[in-house]
Amino acid sequence: MPATKKKASEELIHGVKPHRPKRGEPYMGEVQTEHFRVILNAWKQELVDDIERTMSVMQDETINLPDPNDRATMETDRSLELRTRDRERKLIKKINDSLVDLDKGDYGYCEECGIEIGIKRLEARPTANLCIDCKSLNEIREKQSA
């Protein structure tokens, strides 16, 4: 039987179904706040698990390779892996910041203009802190100053 292709709206977000707001549901009310708390915590746990798995594998590996090429390849792989884990640690900080914003009631609102960021944008990028318009303007400014 052929595999059915899921629509983007049906794909899980870190193991969580996308939210479909009910008519009259308040933006970032209790339901939506809990929805994003679950997503952020699940994503954070995935990253923590990856970091722990990497550290465990790196500690178990022995670096007793007589061939200089093999040693160089292994060191390059380790360097790449450590850079990836460093990016993930920074992402965990952003996730933690988003969880703090959730607790304060600031999550889901643009830091620059204060408007709603939107459910779909937050599901696509749960750590977003700018609406799409402000983000686009920032990117244009960055390109102009580069």
Image (cartoon, rainbow, N blue to C red):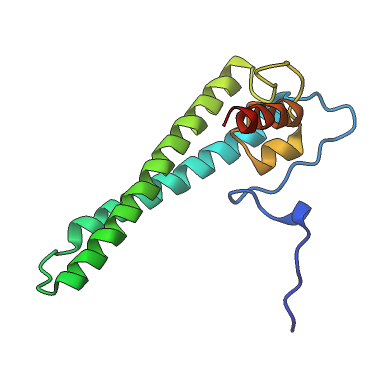
Q: Where residue 31 sits: x, y (%)?
A: 72, 30
- Quadrant of residue 135 in the image? top right
Determine whether 29 is above or below 34 in the image.
above
- Residue drawn where x is 69% and y is 21% of the image: 110
- Quadrant of residue 75 in the image? bottom left
Q: Where residue 66 sits: x, y (%)?
A: 9, 73
- Residue drawn where x is 39% and y is 52% of the image: 50
Identify the image quadrant of the N terminus: bottom right
Task: Judge whether residue 57 can be spotted in this image.
Answer: no
Numbered circles on residues, count: 0
- The residue lying toward the viewer, choosing from 41 and 142, is 142
11 vs 69, left or right, is right
Q: Where residue 89 sits: x, y (%)?
A: 39, 38
- Residue drawn where x is 80% and y is 41% of the image: 20
Determine whether 116 is above or below 11 in the image.
above
Q: Residue furthest bottom?
A: 1
Q: Where residue 11 sits: x, y (%)?
A: 70, 55
Identify the image quadrant of the C terminus: top right
Task: Judge whether residue 19 can be spotted in this image.
Answer: yes
